[in-house]
Image (cartoon, coloured by chain):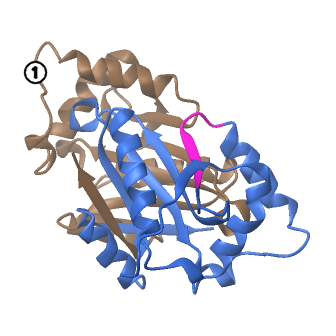
Chain colours: A brown, B blue
């Protein structure tokens, strides 16, 4: 790994939506799904507002020492009955800007999410990662995750 | 499959918590995690209240024609930026009472969840199922799900 780049993890703002969408699109799977156009389609801003108003969701960005947004993730806190009424934290949409990989940014974001989930009473953190993302799976195992489940999806 | 038992899918109530916990416990994985004691530990009622107050969560039960609760699941609606700002539906804690299996009850519950997620604007439904639950995976594939992802978990 190259030198660690310390980042600040903070709540995403309205003016971060463009850079987050470009990160989501700059990806083998995301490139077919996203529309990183200029101006950005309004669907992204509508979604951002829905996330902002949802108390169970935290859409976060990693900001480097120059103030540039170089990563993002979304954490959802899910209460539930199972495991003696334990809440779970679900991590989604994890991205690190291509030119900033291997600097420990993803690890800082995931460690933030784990700590936040613990603080909010979760006993478990879970995520789905596409079968093709072999590097991501290795990364999560290194951070203590188990590939214990099959992640099943149904797109409409 | 035996004859289909039509069920009513309705919101779980406070007095359903006991039967839901017994279903969660009556399971190779759940038996080690749950405490289906009488009286039920208060942690379950606290979790039920947290779920009830969360507008993004729907904890549902399947009720048979005699009014008995024979299944449960939880659906979470998750807005997010990816896939052009598509919301996702996350299905968790799916259980059918052991003595009621193979009567189409699980299918009715999952079809309810898919329809509800569509109604609420989702373009995707997702779930994690433990690697050991081979029958469950076959069941979900039959309903159109793809085993497209690895489900990673970290327990504290």
Front-most of residues A15 and A68:
A15
Taking the spot 17% from the left edge, 66% from the top edge, the residue there is A132
- Residue B51's spot in the image, x, y percent? 66, 45
Quadrant, the C terminus of chain A? top left
- Residue B82's spot in the image, x, y percent? 27, 37
Whether B60 is among the magenta residues is yes
Q: Which residue, as the protein is rendered here, is positioned at the far top?
A: A39
Whether B62 is among the magenta residues is no
Taking the spot 69% from the left edge, 36% from the top edge, the residue there is B53
Taking the spot 45% from the left edge, 55% from the top edge, the residue there is B91
Relative to A38, does residue B103 appear above or below in the rendering? below
- Residue A103's spot in the image, x, y percent? 31, 52
Q: How many marks?
A: 1
On the rendered structure, is B143 left or right of B108?
Answer: left
On the rendered structure, is A26 left or right of A10?
Answer: left
Residue wearing tag 1: A37
Q: Give the range drawn in magenta.
A: B54-61
| Chain ID at mark 1 | A
Report whether residue B88 is seen: no
Front-most of residues A38 and A3:
A38
Quadrant, the N terminus of chain A? bottom left
Relative to B25, does residue A78 appear above or below in the rendering? above
Taking the spot 51% from the left edge, 44% from the top edge, the residue there is A76
Front-most of residues B41 and B71:
B71
On the rendered structure, is B143 left or right of B35?
Answer: left
Report whether residue B61 is seen: yes
- Residue B121's spot in the image, x, y percent? 33, 32
> For the stretch drawn in magenta, what is the main secondary structure?
strand
Relative to B67, does residue B26 appear above or below in the rendering? below
Q: Is mark 1 on a helix, strand or loop?
A: loop
């Amino acid at each position: 790994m190259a030198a660690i780049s310390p980042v600040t993890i903070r709540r995403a703002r309205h003016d971060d939506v463009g850079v987050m969408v470009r990160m989501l699109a700059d990806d083998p799977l995301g490139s077919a799904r996203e529309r990183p156009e200029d101006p950005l389609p309004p669907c992204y801003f509508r979604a951002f507002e829905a996330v902002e108003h949802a108390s169970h969701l935290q859409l976060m960005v990693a900001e480097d020492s120059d103030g540039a947004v170089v990563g993002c993730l979304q954490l959802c806190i899910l209460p539930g009955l199972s495991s003696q009424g334990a809440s779970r934290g679900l991590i989604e949409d994890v991205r690190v800007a291509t030119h900033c990989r291997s600097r420990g940014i993803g690890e800082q974001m995931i460690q933030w999410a784990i700590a936040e989930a613990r603080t909010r009473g979760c006993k478990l953190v879970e995520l789905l990662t596409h079968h093709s993302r072999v590097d991501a799976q290795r990364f999560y195992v290194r951070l203590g995750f188990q590939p214990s489940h099959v992640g099943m999806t149904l797109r409409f």
